[in-house]
Image (cartoon, rainbow, N blue to C red):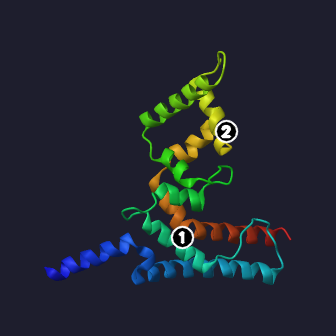
Amino acid sequence: MMGKIKQIREAKAEIENPHESERMQALAEILAEIQASQRAAVMDQREAAGIDPDDDRERLDRAARVSEILDLVDGYGPGGRPLSEVWLVQCAPDDIDTTEPSITAHYAEMSEAEWEAQIERWAETIRETQSGEIDATDRELADHHISKKWGVSIDRFEAVVVDFDPATALEDLLAGPSKETEQAIKANTETLANS
């Protein structure tokens, strides 16, 4: 019984501080090594064949990838960054401004009712700060605010941030580099076939 309690405490400590856990570090290094080696093989193939598919793929930095994986695990411990914030930092599309990921992640954690209330608050604030009547719906005013703050329309912001899906985020965070490598292999094949 005491052995089980000790194991539970050790596992809890590892999840609470994965960057300091030798076991978590080792697991992250294994995944990072696999992904970096696969990418290196594709990049070596490009160099040997003298091709440049122009797909913006680069070699993976193993140390940076280990840190990204540990950041993901850290998000599951108490006090860690939420999964939505980790995803925004590592995987968010380029068209969304993520200079303040903790603020942006807040909207990914909202329920539908909370999001609708947020739209109303933004619209109310805009109406209060403007002189005269504003002939626009709450949603149109929120769209204006979002486009100024995050550089995208309200529809795009909802699709990427508000409709955040943890399962898809986990897949992006863990398998994203492997999927990009697969796309690079296909780009190599296409470039070679067309030359």
- Name which of mark 1 and mark 2 comes first in the sequence: 1
Q: Give residue 152's quadrant in the image.
A: top right
The residue type indicated by label 1 comes to Glu
Q: Nearer the viewer, residue 99 or 67?
A: 99
Q: Quadrant of the N terminus?
A: bottom left
**Which residue does the numbered mark 2 point to in the structure image?**
147
The correct choice, above or below, for 116 with respect to 190 in the image is above
Rendering coords of residue 145 (x, y %): 63, 35
- Write the residue at 75% across / 65% down: 55
Instruction: Point out which mark residue 68 bears.
Output: 1
Q: Is residue 168 visible?
A: no
Q: Is residue 18 visible?
A: yes
Q: Quadrant of the C terminus?
A: bottom right
The residue type indicated by label 2 comes to Ser
Name the element at disc 2.
helix
Rendering coords of residue 194 (x, y %): 83, 67
The correct choice, above or below, for 5 with respect to 114 in the image is below
Instruction: Point out which mark residue 187 bears.
Output: none
Rendering coords of residue 107 (x, y %): 50, 44
